[in-house]
Amino acid sequence: MASRSLRTFQAASVAVRALPLPLLAAAAEAVAGRLGPRLMAGKAAQLGRHIERVAPQLDPEEVQAAVRRGVGSYARYWVESFRLPGLSARVVDRGFSVVGYDNVQRSLCAGVGPILVLPHLGGWEWAAAWLGRVMGERVTAVVERLEPTDLFDWFVTLRQSYGIDVVPVGPEAMGRLVRAVKDERIVCLLSDRDITGSGVEVEFFGERTTLPAGPALLARRTGAPLLPTAVYFRRGAHVAHVGPPVEVPPNAPLRQYLTQVTQELATALEGLIVAAPDQWHLLEPNWPSDGADLGPAQQNPRL
């Protein structure tokens, strides 16, 4: 029998097919922005803390307004993800524009799959669908394993339906990613949160924390460029920004290389996030002080 979590997401994915996508996305943003902060208080509190880090100039009322927009943005992300399998290439293309795609093309022309390093920002899965359906590129992405297992398997199938080759976090991930780069696939790595707790210590928005070492290590092993990338919601559409390759130190010892490159990526991610902090869907603790300040009652598991 399917788990309750799976049945819930399956029902949601069916329900969102009843209305035109622009109307549905706008409604989801409005309703979630109004009700979400109360229904998911712990995650909203964590989101507010992150927004305060990114935009310290905001007063408390402005932070709460940004939280409401952030929860609405998160709802839009899910609605679009559920609708993507049924959207035509024409619709996907019409709702998308990109700045800096030449950075991707240069890598592919050189016979190397680029590594797109992303924060949990906006609607990145729409960009993955655009790459596959419109541009004819092959996309590989690493995802966190979810419980229960049947829910994780359902999400894998969902993402495969709009062109993403899914690699679960785990000991086999690096080998599969190396092969993907050599096979000229575009690799997408969400890199603003250290899921495993074994990452590299960096300065990130004014406090020390760890971020994953995987992007820097993959670039070291393959020579692929690291391209900081974000996909923003813009008035019913999406705008992607693909930055130039992060500079990597040639012939540096591995530890020095990982530290320097991961810090460069952290700085690049800061620049992408600060452009739209209310679209940053990071709803979990990300710094050592988060748990102590918010307390265990706010520590909700990831959806």
Image: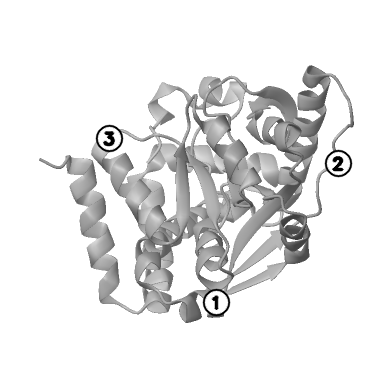
Q: CA distance from mark 3 to mark 2?
A: 39 Å
Q: Is residue 281 visible?
A: no
Write down the residue under mark 3. Answer: 149
User: In which quadrant is the N terminus drawn?
Assistant: top left
SS label for mark 3:
helix
Tag of residue 245:
none
Q: Position of residue 301 (x, y in %)?
A: 38, 32
Decide which of 245, 14 is in the foreground and name it: 245
Q: Earlier in the sequence, mark 1 or mark 3?
A: 1
Image height of 169 relative to 93, above or below = above
Mark 1 and 3 residues: CB-CB less than 8 Å, in contact? Answer: no
Label 1 crowding class (10 Å Cα cut-off): few <14, some 14-19, many 20+?
Answer: some
Write down the residue under mark 2. Answer: 247
Write down the residue under mark 1. Answer: 93
Label 2 crowding class (10 Å Cα cut-off): few <14, some 14-19, many 20+?
Answer: few
SS label for mark 2:
loop
Amino acid type for the residue under numbered disc 3: Thr
Q: CA distance from mark 1 to mark 3?
A: 33 Å
Q: Quadrant of residue 108?
A: bottom right
